[in-house]
Image (cartoon, rainbow, N blue to C red):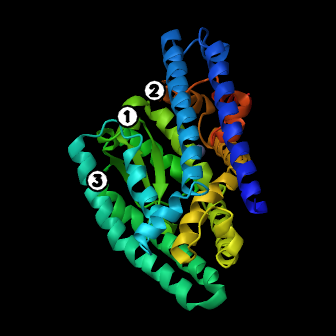
Amino acid sequence: MHWFTAVFLVALALATAVRLWLSRRHIEHVAARRDAVPAEFSEYIALAAHQKAADYTTARTRLGVFETLAAAALLLGFTLGGGLQLLSEAWERVFEPFGLYRTFVIEARFGFNRMSLALFLADLAKLAALGALLGIPLVFLVLWLMARMGSAWWLYVWLAWVTFNLLLAVIYPTLIAPLFNRFSPLEDADLRARIESLLAKCGFRARGLFVIDGSKRSSHGNAYFTGFGAAKRIVLFDTLISRLAPPEIEAVLAHELGHFARRHVWKRLALVFGASLGLLWLLGWLIGQNWFYAALGVRSQGTAMALVLFFMVVPVFTFLLQPLASLYSRLHEFEADAYAARHADARDLVRALVKLYRDNAATLTPDPLHSAFYDSHPPAVARIARLQAHQA
Ligand SMILES: [Zn+2]
């Protein structure tokens, strides 16, 4: 056995075992607390809602167990089992843009439980058209750079990738997002005045305050900022407005402003671009190593095969970095909460969070290790305790 085959198998076994172990802990932890609402929440969350959140969490985590097992089996089948080799022989040089599919199709498919089939198909058609318009030229550019730029191609691909992403971020608010949702100016005068005074207090300039019809896809409420510089827009989901009182919406926005004031968007972008530079450099090196193909059960070498293999195998290794990424994200959430507590009323943010936890059936009692591994947001109890400490 090649040493890299052994490393790959150990990493896959480890990642799968850790996933299954975390899932089991999480299910047991939530089940053991199913019959009592945590004391901090007992005033606001009914036992039935708490149990619904527990059952929802359990159902999703259980599905995740099967998904983990299926993914590991599929990955083994494709690599060592010879599946990729078979595919490549049958399909020679046909390059499937897996990354585009994941970004543009899967994202649309999940979590949109209010979506009608017609809307789903319309979204799909728009996404496919967008994917073709933006993605196909990018894929050709990447393949061309890989073929033409010699051994430093990965640097050029990285520059193209960064430029593409920045361009996308610039055109998204005005050209892409309106294809999927209707943007209307916020009409509620009281709420508008409240938000404008908050923005003035925080020294934040935005071009426009919009409401979108998020309710046609999902019942989840949300608020976000898009765009750069003076072109920033504030977008509130109609579902958020219908659920939260104006002071609570103000507190949620103050939290989002905290992400901006602390430059979280830029920090995250820098991290993602840095990581993708590292990965592309690694790919540039692996692509020329015979053992990389051989150790993973593939005989045909080449750009497309290396890309497919690389993107299949890399997550097995990067999975083990997940807790660090989650920790970084949770630190940002605490910072944004602290900012919100300074510029709005922390009690309003607590009330808004409790409502959102309840309406999204998010569990209040996650397994601490599961949460440390995966969660981008701190557990409800920790988050609310910190907000209350800011208040005191
Ligand atoms: Zn946040």
Disc 2 target residue: 359
Looking at the rendered image, the disc whose residue lies closer to the viewer, 2 or 3, is 3
Residue 112 position, x and y percent, is: 37, 40
Q: Looking at the image, in which quadrant does ligand 1 appear? A: top right
Question: Quadrant of the rendered structure where residue 92 is?
Answer: bottom left
Q: Amino acid at mark 1?
A: Ser
Q: Tag on residue 123?
A: 3
Q: Residue at x 37, y 46 (%)?
A: 109
Nearer-N-terminus badge (2/3): 3
Which residue is located at x 48 percent, y 63 percent? 86
Dots 1, 3 in contact, CB < 8 A = no
Q: Which residue is mark 1?
A: 219
Q: Residue furthest right?
A: 3
Furthest residue toward left? 118
Q: Earlier in the sequence, mark 1 or mark 3?
A: 3
In the figure, 387 relative to 292: above or below?
above
Element under disc 3: helix
Residue 378, image quadrant: top right
